[in-house]
Image (spheres, rainbow, N blue to C red):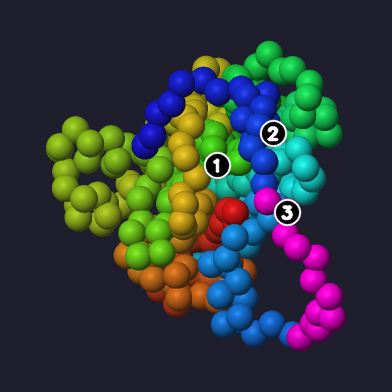
Amino acid sequence: MSQAKEISVTSIFKKLRSKKRTQPLAQKNVNTVPLSDKLIEAELERHFEPPQLNAGTGQSVGKQRDHNEDCLFAFSFCIGSETNNPPFGLYIVADGMGGHQYGEVASNAAVRALSSHLLRKLHPFLANPAGAMEESLQELMNGAVEEAQKAVMQAAPGSGTTLTAALVLGQQMIIAHVGDSRAYSIRPDGRVEPLTRDHSLVRRLEELGHITSEEAASRPDRNVLYRAVGQGEALEPDIFIAPFPLPGYLMLCSDGLWGVIPEKELGKIVNAAPTLQVACQNLVAAANAAGGPDNISVVLVQLLS
């Protein structure tokens, strides 16, 4: 999990505005043809102007649940101009705590509160990057998680939810994490790296060396959390900055996916798909084929630059 010093929104915009990009020559007599999946895949290897974030999503109630307690959010924004505004994206996965009343209400409230807070705060700078902003990205994200905490405690008292969110600005990611939904980086060669650390009792026992990873995977209490949004007055989210995986993908998912599909298989499925949306559909299908014991949510993001 990468750590970095505090970084401001304004500094990212200034850095990108200082770079001049070569303008492509105008082309005449250009014909358009439908693009096959292979042609789309080939285009993704090329340089993109302006840089942009491409995202896909997938979700399923699973095979063994009668309702969906997950919630996801995906928002991408791009301005192409001479000022070189960086692409912006916000991606969230939340999993309402099973066994609690209103788990689906908790996840929905958390996602809506966090996303509305960040978009409201960042909107003036997306519209006018020349402005100044006093808060760092870490402070912005921490404030958003606090709003999510308040929203869950008000909308679904006694319930709770996981919350994993990635705010992407240019080639930087600010990630906020509570619970056991996960963020991964996935590379074209199949490497899969967890970016977040589960706030579960089993994971903590594994970190302390009391149990092995094999024992952790089979324990019946592996879904018990010691930290969740909406649980307790004081919440300590993990908030950190990391570079966007280039080349590669950012993946956010609930435990209905990572809990049944091995990490190596996740990487294979993502890299074998022609598009992000197909990859998400294939991931959901694989989790259901493995029994679908829980709700499944996944968000895949790629930075095209």
Closer to the observer: label 2 or label 1?
2
Q: Mark 2 to mark 3: distance in Å?
A: 15 Å
Q: Which corner quadrant holds the N terminus?
A: top left
Which span of residues is magenta-colored? Answer: 22-33
User: Is 73 drawn above or below residue 38 in the view shown?
Assistant: above
Looking at the image, residue 109 sits to the left or right of residue 278; the answer is right
Task: Give the residue number, with chain letter if any, for mark 2.
Answer: 17
Task: Give the residue number, with chain letter if any, for mark 3.
Answer: 23
Q: Tell me which amino acid carries mark 2.
A: Arg
Sequence-first tag of 2 and 3: 2
Instruction: Answer with the quarter of the image where residue 266 lies.
Output: bottom left
> In the structure shown, which secondary structural element does the residue marked by tag 3 occupy?
loop
Q: Tell me which amino acid carries mark 1.
A: Gln
Task: Give the residue number, with chain letter if any, for mark 1.
Answer: 171
Q: Residue at x 49, y 28 (%)?
A: 239
Relative depth, front residue between 281 and 153: 281
Q: Mark 3 to mark 1: distance in Å?
A: 21 Å
Relative depth, front residue between 202 and 189: 189
> In the structure shown, which secondary structural element does the residue marked by tag 1 occupy?
loop
User: Is 203 drawn above or below residue 143 in the view shown?
Assistant: below
Q: Tell me which amino acid carries mark 3.
A: Gln
Looking at the image, residue 210 sits to the left or right of residue 237; the answer is left
Is residue 15 visible to us here? yes
Q: Is residue 95 magenta?
A: no
**Mark 3 neighbour class, 10 Å CA radius: few under 14, some 14 to 19, many 20 or more:** few
Q: Mark 2 to mark 1: distance in Å?
A: 14 Å
Q: Main secondary structure of the magenta part?
A: loop
Instruction: Answer with the quarter of the image where residue 114 lies.
Output: top right
User: Is 69 drawn above or below residue 180 in the view shown?
Assistant: below
